[in-house]
Amino acid sequence: MRKIIQFFTVAIIAFSASILSADIKPAVIYDMGGKFDKSFNESVYNGAQRFTKETGIKVMEFEVTNEAQREQGMRKMAQRGANVIVCVGFAQADACDKVAKEFPDTKFSIIDVGWLDNANMRQYVFNEHEGSFLVGALAAMASKTGKVGFVGGMDIPLIRKFACGYVQGAKAVNSKVEVYQNMTGTTPAAWNDPAKGSELAKSQFDRGADVVYAAAGGTGAGVYQAAADSGMLAIGVDSNQNYMHPGTMLTSMLKRVDLATYETFMDVKSGNFTSGVKVLGLAEDGVGWALDEHNESLITDVMKSTINGLSDKVKSGSIKVHDYMSDNNCPS
Amino acid sequence: MSDSNIIPKWLSVGVIPLLNLLLAFCVSGLFIFFIGENPFKAISVMIKGAFYYPGAIGYTLYYTTNFIFTGLAVALAFHARLFNIGGEGQAYIGGLGVGLTCLIFDQYLAGFLVTILAILGSVIFGAVWGIIPGYLQAKRGSHIVITTIMFNFIAAALMVYLLVNVIIEPGQMSPETRDFASGVGLVQIHMLAKYLGLNMAMSPLNLSFGIALIVSVGFWFLVWRTKFGYEVRSLGHSETAAIYAGIKVSYTIIIVMAISGGLAGLVAINELLGVHNKLLLGFTAGYGFTGIAVALMGRNHPFGIFLASLLFGALYQGGTELDFEFSSITREMVLLIQGLIILFSGALAYMLNPLVENIYIKYYGNYNNA
């Protein structure tokens, strides 16, 4: 009899434990860049880490190495009982869409995608143009030559959106500023080509630019290195990259994909998950600029107050930063 | 590719590859042990992940299909003593053949017709990408290793240009074409099973696997049962003897490279017609290069290539499972394990031969004198 009672207690404990742990099982599918790319994927990783730290719930992770693995990874996570899966980046849109339809009870959240339509999917779109606007203004203020540079990763509308916001920001504080723009390439390899990033940055320095903004994933590392070598200023992207070269990193344009990841997991945990498109801009703290101990010596009080003033105007809507992707066009 | 005759065949093609594999697993096990995981558990996850979990065998065979095609492509060239490193580029251009055929015809013709045309397209485009280096080798003496490597780069650059500027779906951020029309493509096996009333886990395995097996038999017939195959092997053994025997060397080289390129091009039917249903950048993912190791391990025989492909397919799929199961084993670690196996069974394939030969001779005497 005691054995039986014991058995039932164990069974009940095990059962309730499985219910508790079945409560939320989060998962992330990182893309080809890998979770330690110091930029986009790593920011997602930081968001997942923050969730784990605060709740003690482990996040299942997978890094894809070829095209077929995106779908495989997502399906596998769903089959393993993950009830919320974060898909990282627009390249995963098709796979995420397909698997979300196969598993209507699993929640999905995808970053940088706003064109899908599933009842169990949340889509995050960032107002990168607003964040780039602020760092553009900073660049123009920090520049002594009145010339600033932009190095993009892969030449796609999303990156032109960064560039367009940057140009508008620079012009907002100095209408005569010259902006040089270069894209690293036209394929995904452009996200991970620091050598070429360094070349492009140097050629912009040769033409007189003294501040350069890189929106190029892993390629950015080369741009920052080139700036540090030539004593010029560089602006980081996605994650706070100020620490990489203290003294020559003017600031970083923060794109809070970590927030999107964290928020998704938290909402599922508290039962507040909603589908649809979520737009994160300056007003939502989804984008912004980084100020920390590594760059505070570069930012003067005038710069700080100007940027905060611009930021408030963008938030209130009295300054409208044009979004390149709204009409595939950049006014200049 | 000289096979020593000191020991019986079952030792040189059966036992030695297994020993190599075992050695590779032991070294991998050491690495896994050093990062603080249980090597035996890891190996068991890898094997279960490749063959046992639902859908696992499907994924394994899907990778196997790619390796059979590229392995055969490399092996045929090896028989004529040509080192075709261009499998990657030939597969890529084969994909262009598939993509163009589908994009041009899928609005006008029935799905199965387009599919057949697309298969032909993959072979023809791949063959053209093999013929050019073949011609340069045969008529101009440009070394095939150099030209095929260069043609990989040309193929990659060409595909980037076309996918980014010409055939990209408008409004799409990734360099991909639009989806092929719904009737086009090779049926996936789990759909076929469903149609027959069986329940199979979803996997990308498709009819290309069957095509790969048929092509393997065709390969065996071509190389060992036809006049052309005899000429190819003669050429591989000695070019001067082949010339003396009246074999047209340049012609044979060009045809061998055409068939080799066509075989590599077939990777595209597995990837594009079987799985992705559109043409996309970088779908070859290094299968062409792995084909070299597959051919080496498979001793250039279709059956050996099948087994080697199965091994590599299992490594790819089992490696993925390893990444899922252990948070400490990252994809770089999986790559390391795969690399070790290639090292031991490919590059160091003959390392154990002297040892095994010595042991054999010590106990049984010289095999040839027996």
Image: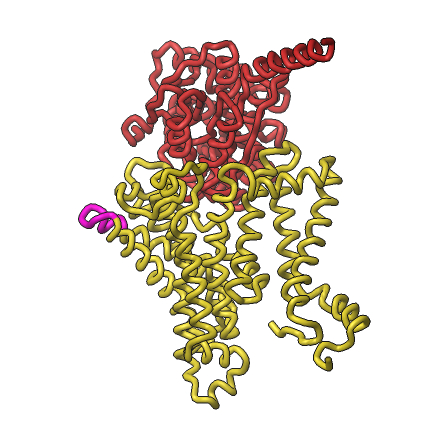
Report if residue B108 lies within the magenta region: yes
Q: Residue furthest right?
A: B362
B354 sits left or right of B142 in the view: right
Whether residue A232 appears in magenta in the rendering, the answer is no
> Where the C terminus of chain B falls, by quadrant?
bottom right
- Which image quadrant is residue B352 in? bottom right
Which stretch did the figure color magenta? B102-111
Question: Which quarter of the picture shows residue B132?
Answer: bottom left
Q: How many dots with numbers?
A: 0
Give the colour chain B carries in the figure. Answer: yellow
Question: Horizontally, is A95 left or right of A47 in the view?
Answer: left
Where residue A298 appears, x then y in whole percent?
58, 23
Residue pictured at 60% horizontal, 72% vertical: B1
Q: Report the side of B288 relative to B297 (left or right).
A: left
Q: Residue furthest bottom?
A: B244
The type of colouring in the image is by chain
The chain painted red is A
